[in-house]
Image (spheres, rainbow, N blue to C red):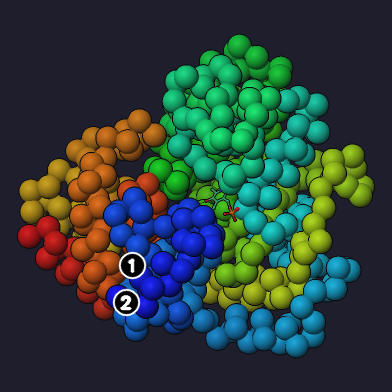
Amino acid sequence: MTKSETLFQRAVKVMPGGVNSPVRAFGSIGASPKFIKSAEGAYLYDEDGNRYIDYIGSWGPMILGHGQPGVLDCVIEACKRGLSFGAATAPEVEMAELVCELIPSIEMVRMVNSGTEAVMSAIRLARGYTKRNKIIKFTGCYHGHSDGLLVKAGSGAMTSGIPDSLGVPVGCTQDTLSADYNNLDSVKGHFERCGEEIAAVIVEPVAANMGVVPPKPGFLEGLRSLCDQYGALLIFDEVITGFRLGICGAQGYYGIKPDLTTFGKIIGGGMPVGAYGGSREIMELVAPVGGVYQAGTLSGNPVAMAAGIAQLMILKEHPEYYVQLNEHANKFYQNIQEILKKSGRPYRVNHVGSLGCLYFTDTEVVDYESAKTSDTKAFTDYCNYMIGHGVYLAPSQFEAMFLSMAHTEEMLQETLKIIEEYFQ
Ligand SMILES: *Cc1c(COP(=O)(O)O)cnc(C)c1O
């Protein structure tokens, strides 16, 4: 038995499913998880000494690659000064100034500890600001695991939300309306029915939790104008896209200004960090200035801020990194599509910047319904082959591939070779 298998046997006895987050379990591909011991650059090493080219990057945060020396040094220095004080610190001011400088739609920001917390708080704020209760979310978009956002996908949830998880009272989701990604009419329908009750529309500007689904031209613009027309707030959940598509995130990439933005993943540089921000007018409604209560013992933690600031500073100082990453990625995903074509597979590759997904379907994937046409059995076989050959992919058809700035041309070529071998 491998060390990973032995660890997994111990893990399942003391942790539900043997993991602390369901996405880490390999059950959906009929395997058991690799236990990772260390990482460097774009490589992961498991407990058995196997090396993998990492296409998860901790689900996004490691855009500079693992163990970036500039980030590590800042974290070590911060640790020496103290792990947590529960009091105001200079790094929090520095982080807030940095976010406000980098993201034009943000004048004030509040740090939290996860993407879930950021979105949950932004929704509360939108409701407090508009004094309305309903929100619109898109089927297949993930916004963390807070009660009101775990709403079942599909047309059954068109008018009233149906809980997606046990333990979520219907009362918590009755104000969550579902719409179809890339379908403005489904949003318009809600607004026409109850526009004066809708506090906010929340959207992943590139949907990256049902594989990767780019917004169709006009989709995000349409959301912006519907929100303006009905006095609702537009919330961009940029937990994945923020500081990834570019230093200004998806809002910079597509040129749309949301009212509120949520961050997570990259903003923490690998530490548990989330944030939400927007205009001063809206943000001054947050406690202790305003009446929307939100707090956190470890929020703005100095070690977490050190990691986040260090990573953001490197990204800010090197705009050419994004150009290179996006160029590399574009070529990489196009090459996968080429390989599929050459081997006579009708499968689809969706990609935006460094995010991409190979769908095992011949249907164009534009929303949740079309994503679901993917042959997950075929994906399982492919995924196991790739991991078995040293390419670490998310063990699910409906997750993105995350390229980092540490992926070299050679690593990408090596990966393409393995993909080609598989399809032959
Ligand atoms: C990961 C993710 C979240 C939740 O963030 P956590 O840090 O896992 O709580 C929210 N929104 C999006 C778009 C995400 O990808």
Taking the view exactly as shown, the residue that stands out farthest to the top is 193
N-terminal of the pair, mark 1 or mark 2, is 2
Left or right relative to 12: residue 251: right
Q: In which quarter of the image is residue 196?
A: top right
Above or below 333: residue 63? below
Q: Which residue is drawn at 60% across and 13% down?
A: 192
Q: Mark 2 points at which residue?
A: 2
Q: In which quarter of the image is residue 165?
A: top right
Left or right relative to 276: residue 370: left
The label number, if any, that marks residue 360 in the structure image: none
Badge 1 vs badge 2, beta-carbon distance below 8 Å: no
Is residue 248 in view from this perspective?
A: no
Left or right relative to 333: residue 91: right
Q: Is mark 2 on a helix, strand or loop?
A: loop
Q: Name the residue under label 1.
A: 392
Q: Which residue is drawn at 50% across and 30% down?
A: 152
Give the mark toward the camera: 1 or 2. Answer: 2
Above or below 169: residue 186? above
Give how far apart the Cα atoms at labels 1 and 2 are. 17 Å
Q: Residues within 10 Å of mark 2 (few under 14, many from 20)?
A: few
Instruction: Inspect the image, locate mark 2, and give the three-letter code of the amino acid beneath it.
Output: Thr
